[in-house]
Image: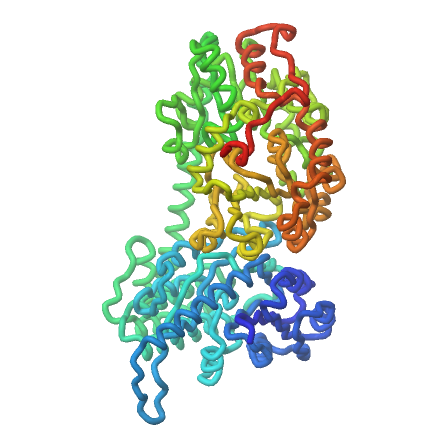
Amino acid sequence: MPELSVVVYGRNVQGHLAESLTALADAAPAVEVVVAAVGASARQAAEQYPYVTLVALPDGTPDGTARAAGADRATGRWLQFVHSKDTVPALAARAVAERTAALQKTAAAQQSAAPQVAAPPQEAAPTQEVDVLLTDHVRSTWRHARMPSPDGGVLTEPGRREVSLGDCPDLLRVTPLLGTHVVRADFWRAQQREGLATDDELFTAYALLLTAGRIAALDQVVLEERQLRAQSLPPLTADDHYALLAAYERLLRLAAERHADPGPRAVLYAAMVTASLRTVARAPLPDDAAREFFARAARAAVELRPPGYRHPGGLEGVRSRLLEENAYTRYRVFQAANQRRRAVRSAVRKSRRTVGRKVRDLQYHHDLKRPVDPDLAVFSAYWDRGVACNPAAVAAKLAELAPHIHQVWIVTAGNVPLLPPGTDHVVPGTRRYWRVLATAKYLVNNANFPNAVVKRPDAVHLQTHHGTPLKRMGLDQLDHPAAAKGLNFHDLLARVDRWDYSVSSNSHSTQMWQRAYPSRYVELDYGYPRNDVYYTATAADVRAVRERLGIAPGRRALLYAPTHRDYEATWTPRLDLAALADRLGEDTVLLVRGHYFYGGAASPLTSLRRSGRLVDVSTYDPVEDLALAADALITDYSSIMFDYANLDRPVVIYADDWETYAKTRGVYFDLPAQAPGPVARTQEELTRILTSDAWRDGAAAEARAVFRRRFCEFDDGRAAERVVRRVFLGEPEESLPAITPLDGRTPAPTPEEATR
């Protein structure tokens, strides 16, 4: 019996079924996939996937019937229902199966430990099994991909506990999607017998929680809900609105039957009131139909109001009271007044912003008339994230060689607490922020300063960049609008025209920067300052980093650092990290780092991190420490491969979606053909490489040597010194330290060498 059966059901909506089934390929055969295909198009799409169990259904079969048919064929202990338009992210089904298996073990242990008490005749013995596992989702539309849901905060409340709904009624605030409500198969069949598994997804999802004995939560995205464009769907009718109200009425009565505690009823009641008022406010109903619906909703609000229920405060409370009083006319007057109030407030805010901008512009342009301060340097990295990357390395060397130049960092308010103690800083938008930008002699960035920044003739702008380009950049994105995402190329070139210097680590980068960012700046072919540490770090430094990360001497540490996909809003590992860690054995530690673009997203590594099978280093800075600690690098298309190559340690490329990435993002060269080491296209290939000597054999070393000659051309440990002496101290080119040839450089010791 499989642990989990994923039941994909429905017709082939807009041809999305194939995408859904392709995403589940990695889960089979450990996870059973059943397709309840409605219509010929869905059946034909499902027939292309040999690992699915197909249930062919005629056109017009309702969703509830399709779910029931799929569940009847499923053999798993747990069921996840996924509509054919939606998708299960890579590895999510396996994560669900692992969690449900753990729940099963817990239930078995509790049952064996509990005293055996005979149940009365005709009465089932009580069970401590979890009936529903609640999970998270992301939402995609025709315009935006993988937007986080609002459910994360609620899902963290139970933690790893198994709770009742009475213990945690806020679980009813989780979006009522069946795809996120993973249900025990026996419990689902009981729901069917009681008539609680219907065509209505909202009713069915809520009913699962109201009748569940125990509930668990998994704060991980296991569903990508695709919301179709409203204009592509049949318009909602008055009957649809009444059906929604009827569903809430039935749910509230069910809650009253099953729960003496008023908590669940109060949450559901608030949801009903909100849905009713939203219908009246937004649905395009004629006034008489809206009035009739309002009256029906008012009766339900009065009859089903839970004992002791307290109205919310503010405007929401006023609306709720008007509904209970069936005061439709007053509600409309209140609604119109509130709309006028919002319009006035919006106009006032807009006016204030306009005035604020004008005042700021006046102050900024006044500051531009002040003398430039020759001893002031402003630094920013990664869109004001903090002290990092090439700007940080330049700043450190500047403090050493020119301590008289005062440094000010631009940092967002949220990142200020993370700054090194004593760092002078400004927050974007503040009065001092604009003053230092107006008066500083030196402005250093690895991205760009805002469009409003004026380039003064005697100011110096230093562009350090933040990686060697594999993906297309700048003007080269013109042919890749999906990656450009509305980038204004005229504004981009205006920002580029402010640059005085552009730092490069190799001839490839120099050529690509000239092509992607054409302007009159001076190319500094000096190497990347952030890479200096790969030649200056000592054995003691390597040991210290590994100790901070908890890596025991003698254990192999593999740094897995994938890059950003422009079509993903949140990061989900493309590898089954648990399975990989198991195959690699106890002597290997996985250091897993998500891309900084996903810094605000909840990490999907939580459960694996708790198990001790890997170290989540997504928020660890600086990344150079991680490279020093690692015996080898696993990456896909991240620029970290170019930096890490300076260490002359093994690099393995995992290019499972190279063709898709190259087509959607655009690239400058064929990485699989010119990689710094072995290339894997599947997880099994990657595992074979890492469990044999292929990751570090002669062929790998030869490929790495070719790669290093091309891309580590200028990095020799003295890049920051060259930049500071040329840009800040004004020394001539010929007096700068010459670049040491590749064969004459000694990289930092490997972890093995550091322990000798």
Task: From this view, report whether residue 582 is shown above or below residue 406.
Answer: below
Task: From this view, report whether residue 394 is shown above or below residue 655.
Answer: above
| Quarter of the view holding residue 706 | top right
Q: Residue furthest bottom?
A: 121
Q: Residue furthest front?
A: 756
**Which quarter shows the N terminus?**
bottom right
Q: Is residue 594 visible?
A: no
Residue at image location 60% in from the left, 61% down from the top = 87
In-front residue for pair 345/656:
656
From the top left corner, tell me how far across and down residue 53 is, in percent: 65, 75
From the top left corner, tell me how far across and down residue 588 is, in percent: 53, 47
Q: How is the image coloured?
A: rainbow
Task: From this view, report whether residue 132 is shown above or below residue 704.
Answer: below
Task: From this view, report whether residue 23 is shown above or below residue 525.
Answer: below
| Left or right relative to 397: residue 114 | left
From the top left corner, tell me how far across and down residue 407 is, in percent: 44, 17
In-front residue for pair 675/332:
675
Residue at image location 57% in from the left, 52% down from the top = 584
From the top left corner, tell me how far across and down residue 281 is, in percent: 44, 59
| Left or right relative to 494: residue 439 | left
In-front residue for pair 172/491:
172
Q: Is residue 25 visible?
A: yes
Residue at image location 44% in from the left, 55% down from the top = 611
